[in-house]
Image (cartoon, helix red, strand yellow):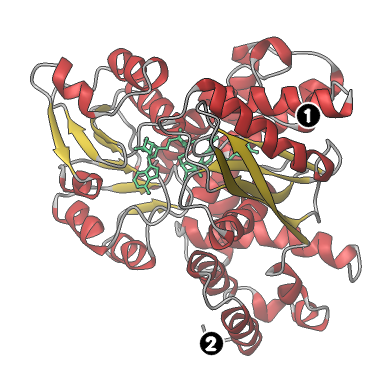
């Protein structure tokens, strides 16, 4: 980072939030990209745009007490970071995972500002969650937790204020329980207050598939335009086996790719014949079991302990779809050594900075999650639209709109990379294109 203003603001963040490593990592990546445009915008410094951009408009932290099935009391910590509302109400998912802390919430909320800007829909950036671990809990325990969480959260959200959705550990079951409690407390059927709802009560068709499908639509654009290539005949690794990973694997397969490895936090499976998604979906969606079960049931497949070793499997295309910093330098180098051609992120910040450098310096195609996983939140935006007009669109209509949005995001990132003199640097393009719109809106709205 050479620019004095960027350096000054980054140093302030570093001093103030020194213990928030994930947040600092996200800010640094974006600031390094803004270096390419900062000289053209002296008004940003005059108006403290960056100082405001790195400070959440509001952060709520609260106690979430709940009782387990044996009557024992537990207390978790809940969060909602309302980061930036320059272009629309705060929008972003809720994560339930033991690793959740303020740094993780802030990095996700910060990324969400730029991601939502790229979708072209009117959504600001936010994120929430809790260090609650849904694993091994009964449905009744999850319900009581969600109800307690919403009993505090409800006063901070609303279709014109802040609209949560799912993320790690929060899927249709949890969204349903949270929506139910919101409705009960407020006595309002306010559909657009949360997205990712079940189809019978205002959910959008294709929202479940949207992040994974959108990732493949984006990746296909990049493959086509930058390499004159496609998924046809490609060997693919998809890390994770949750919502994003499952529908990434499904769409890659439909587009002619062969997904040979997937993982969970304990280990990965390798199936040289291509992963049987019907069996995988049954294990993950119905049985909520470990991915190791797949190898017990599918002849010819293998299970290996340790999820990070998944990157050592030979592939043409890698889709990291599990969690932040899941790929380090060793993983990235293994991909390079095995002749991988592209890494397109499904998770948020899955590559650490060293891994990004290795991937980019070796000429692999690379897209950051804030661009390539934006299909999830974009379809959440489409869910809000359907709730507002009191209509629901068909699966095909939503999927087509999603496809169009992902193509546009690719184009916006590519065009910005050209303007910055680095054609094809989609990370640079995503950060610049996402930020310019937010900065413009912040400038127009004065010092707020
Ligand atoms: P899920 O909870 O459905 O699945 C998460 C998957 O990642 C599981 O397989 C989980 O394994 C694995 N995982 C979680 N933490 C780790 C870790 N620390 N190391 C290795 N594996 C891990 O979540 P989603 O699929 O919804 O989310 C995955 C990623 O995609 C996240 O980064 C999320 O922020 C991002 N994302 C999600 C969107 C959505 O619409 N859901 C939209 C855009 C991005 P295990 O079961 O063992 O915990
Ligand atoms: O990281 C993300 O973009 C999400 N978890 C989806 C957020 C949303 O509001 O749909």
Crowd rating for badge 1 (residues with CA inside 10 Å; few <14, some 14–19, many 20+): many
Seen in the picture, residue 72 relative to 436 is either above or below; the reply is above
Residue 317, quarter of the rendered image: top left
Residue 56 visible here = yes
Residue at image location 61% in from the left, 25% down from the top: 143
Is residue 405 in view from this perspective?
Answer: no
Q: Is residue 106 left or right of residue 29?
A: right
> Is 257 rendered above or below residue 205?
below
Residue 321 position within the rendered picture, expressed as x and y whole percent measured from the top left: 39, 41
Q: Which residue appears farthest toward the front when viewing the image?
A: 71
The quarter of the image that holds ligand 2 is top right
The earlier-in-sequence mark between 1 and 2 is 2
User: Where residue 226 sits: x, y (%)?
Assistant: 40, 47
Horizontal side of 228 relative to 113 (left or right) equals left
Which residue is tagged 2?
2
Residue at figure coordinates x 82%, y 83% from the top left: 46
Residue 55, image x and y in percent? 71, 69
- Name the mark on residue 182: 1
Is 28 located above or below residue 148 in the figure? below
Q: Image quadrant for the C terminus?
A: bottom right
């Amino acid at each position: 980072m050479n620019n004095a203003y960027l350096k000054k603001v980054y140093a302030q963040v570093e001093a103030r939030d020194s213990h928030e490593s994930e947040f600092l990592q996200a800010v640094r990546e974006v600031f390094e990209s803004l270096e390419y445009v900062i000289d053209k915008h002296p008004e940003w410094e005059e108006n403290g745009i960056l100082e405001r951009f790195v400070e959440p408009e509001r952060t709520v932290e609260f106690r979430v007490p709940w009782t387990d099935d044996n009557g024992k009391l537990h207390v978790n910590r809940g969060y909602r970071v309302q980061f930036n509302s320059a272009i629309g109400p705060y929008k972003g998912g809720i994560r339930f995972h033991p690793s959740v802390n303020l740094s993780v919430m802030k990095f996700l909320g910060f990324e969400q500002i730029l991601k939502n800007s790229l979708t072209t829909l009117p959504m600001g950036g936010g994120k929430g969650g809790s260090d609650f671990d849904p694993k091994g809990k009964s449905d009744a325990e999850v319900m009581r937790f969600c109800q307690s969480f919403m009993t505090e959260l409800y006063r901070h959200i609303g279709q014109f204020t802040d609209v949560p959705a799912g993320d790690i550990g929060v899927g249709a079951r949890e969204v349903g329980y949270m929506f139910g409690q919101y409705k009960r407390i407020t006595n309002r059927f306010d559909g657009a207050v949360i997205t990712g709802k079940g189809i019978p009560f205002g959910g959008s068709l294709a929202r479940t598939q949207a992040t994974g499908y959108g990732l493949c639509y984006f990746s296909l654009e990049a493959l086509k335009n930058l390499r004159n290539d496609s998924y046809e005949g490609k060997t693919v690794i998809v890390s994770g086996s949750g919502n994003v990973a499952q529908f990434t694997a499904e769409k890659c397969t439909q587009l002619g790719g062969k997904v040979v490895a997937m993982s969970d936090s304990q280990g990965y499976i390798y199936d040289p014949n291509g992963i049987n998604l019907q069996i995988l979906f049954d294990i993950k969606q119905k049985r909520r079991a470990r991915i190791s079960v797949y190898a017990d049931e599918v002849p010819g497949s293998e299970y290996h302990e340790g999820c990070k070793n998944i990157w050592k499997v030979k592939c043409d295309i890698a889709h990291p779809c599990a969690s932040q910093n899941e790929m380090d330098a060793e993983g990235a180098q293994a991909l390079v050594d095995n002749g991988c051609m592209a890494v397109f992120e499904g998770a948020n910040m899955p590559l650490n900075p060293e891994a990004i450098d290795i991937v980019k310096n070796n000429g692999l195609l690379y897209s950051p999650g804030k661009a390539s996983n934006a299909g999830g939140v974009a379809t959440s935006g489409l869910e809000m639209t359907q709730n507002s007009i009191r209509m629901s669109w068909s699966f095909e209509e939503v999927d087509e709109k999603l496809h169009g949005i992902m193509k546009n995001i690719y184009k916006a990132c590519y065009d910005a990379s050209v303007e910055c003199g680095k054609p094809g640097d989609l990370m640079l393009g995503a950060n610049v294109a996402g930020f310019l719109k937010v900065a413009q809106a912040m400038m127009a709205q004065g010092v707020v």
